[in-house]
Image (spheres, rainbow, N blue to C red):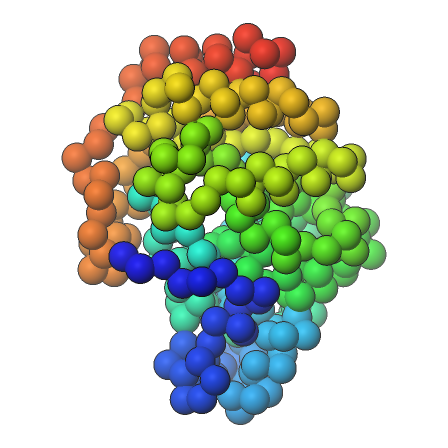
Amino acid sequence: MTTPTPSADVSESLPATGGAASDTLAKGAGGAAAGPLGGLRTAVGLSRPELLLGLRTGEIGTVHSWELVTAVDGPGTRMTTFVAGCPLRCLYCHNPDTMAARNGAPVYADDLLKKIRRYRRVFAATGGGITLSGGEILAQPAFARRVLRGAKELGVHTAIDTSGFLGGNADDALLADVDLVLLDVKAGDETTYRRVTGRALEPTLRFGRRLAGLGIEIWIRYVLVPGLTDNPATIAPVADYAASLPTVSRVEVLPFHQLGRDKWTRLGLDYALAGTQPPPAELVESTRSIFRDRGLTTY
């Protein structure tokens, strides 16, 4: 599968004229949404220029879905919002329906903030907050900036879940409103990283170092896939990297699963890991030990 060139924001990836992606978004802007948008109102009756302007300013973002979750995506109970559009093509992605921007609906940042406001008491009671995920949230930096700023004004804890590949899109003003970054490091060597994602490793490493320099808390996430990311030669460099960042407070080793397989099939995409089994408990524990041996709190 070909991978689009990363852009400063999702609007940059839309064609200049008559683009199918932006046309689909505009046609879908028809009022209150059901299903995965859970009542979030979509942008209504916009022309293509109006939609593009909204995307560029961050007034509008392409949102795939949102959910309330506990004990994942950060501390406490969290409202996790999944945006659509990602420059990576991870072989094990369990949300392949968020890869393309066209699979999202245009949602106003202010409407998402209204939803966040409703759950402030839940967040306060559980030590939770919001997490912006994807797709890749840093493909929509203007939208992220608006939502994060609004959440902080509401006194809500904020997190982003990102590969870090588009970390250059996040300016210091955006990051000033981020309390926690869930940094997904897919592999520790360039060859494996490119095999997993189709992209280069260095942008992720550079972004993590920048976060640490800014004093932002980081949770490192590592997906353990038998036959792909289970070699100690690619795990150890990730552990060394995590240990080198003073603001890493937690590492999560996430066992591969097949829960996203049906999505790949429905989308007509080739799923290279169809025959891969989840890692045995012994492999998961030995992988966690590699991180723990470096003094890292690891789950």
Q: Position of residue 250 (x, y in %)?
A: 61, 24
* Whether residue 170 is situated above or below residue 235 in the rendered picture: below
Please tell me in which quadrant of the rendered image residue 75 appears.
top right
User: In the image, 199: left or right of 42?
Assistant: left
Viewer-nearest residue: 24 or 108? 24
Q: Position of residue 32 (x, y in %)?
A: 52, 76
Q: Residue at x 31, y 34 (%)?
A: 257
User: Would you say residue 45 is visible in this rendering?
Assistant: no
* Whether residue 11 is situated above or below residue 153 in the rendered picture: below
Q: Residue at x 72, y 64 (%)?
A: 146
**Which part of the image, by quadrant, shows the N terminus?**
bottom left
Q: Position of residue 39 (x, y in %)?
A: 53, 67
Q: How many circles with numbers are drawn on the protein?
A: 0
The furthest residue to the top? 293
User: Would you say residue 83 is visible in this rendering?
Assistant: yes
Q: Residue at x 79, y 49 (%)?
A: 176
The furthest residue to the left? 275
Please tell me in which quadrant of the rendered image residue 147 appears.
bottom right
Viewer-nearest residue: 36 or 283? 283
User: In the image, 257: left or right of 12?
Assistant: left
Q: Residue at x 34, y 15 (%)?
A: 283
